[in-house]
Amino acid sequence: FKPMKQTIKLKFVKDLKKKAEICYEDCDIKVVAQKIISGNVNHIVITDRENNLKGIVTSFDITKAIANEKNDLNSIITKRVVTTFNDEPIGNAARKMRQNNISALPVIDKNKKVVGIITSEELM
């Protein structure tokens, strides 16, 4: 008797990513806050008009901005964004989140265009 060989399909980011909520870099903070509420999300990806990644804003960033009476979106954007790619294994994406103490990774293509987002919620 030989045990059946089990095939485990390794999941990639493309298997779990979702559509990113996006605002342009010249958006008003209120618009970003409204997108967070209407999209029921915690992360808004910031791009230019050509969909090039410029940064990310979290619901916590918005809360701090309101508390500190900041109105300039540019002052709260995280510009050094840790990213992932469609063909990256899920384990690598999870490791990036853990090592950087973050809960989301924008998914970009080879031209740095935003193609989605993966959050810690998708990894659970």
Image (cartoon, rainbow, N blue to C red):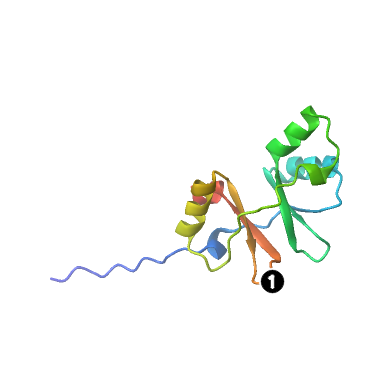
Q: Position of residue 32 (x, y in %)?
A: 80, 44
Find numbered disc 1 in the image and state the secondary structure of the residue it sits on: loop
> Is residue 108 placed above or below 118 in the rendered structure?
below
Residue type for callout 1:
Asn
Q: Quadrant of residue 52?
A: bottom right
**Which residue in the protein does label 1 denote?**
111
Relative to 106, 9 lies left or right: left
Q: Position of residue 114 (x, y in %)?
A: 70, 63
> Is residue 58 placed above or below 49 in the rendered structure?
above
> Is residue 121 placed above or below 18 in the rendered structure?
above
> Is residue 54 placed above or below 87 in the rendered structure?
above
Q: Residue at x 69, y 66 (%)?
A: 112
Q: Quadrant of residue 86?
A: bottom right
Q: Position of residue 58 (x, y in %)?
A: 69, 42
The quadrant of the rendering that contains the N terminus is bottom left
Q: Position of residue 11 (x, y in %)?
A: 46, 63
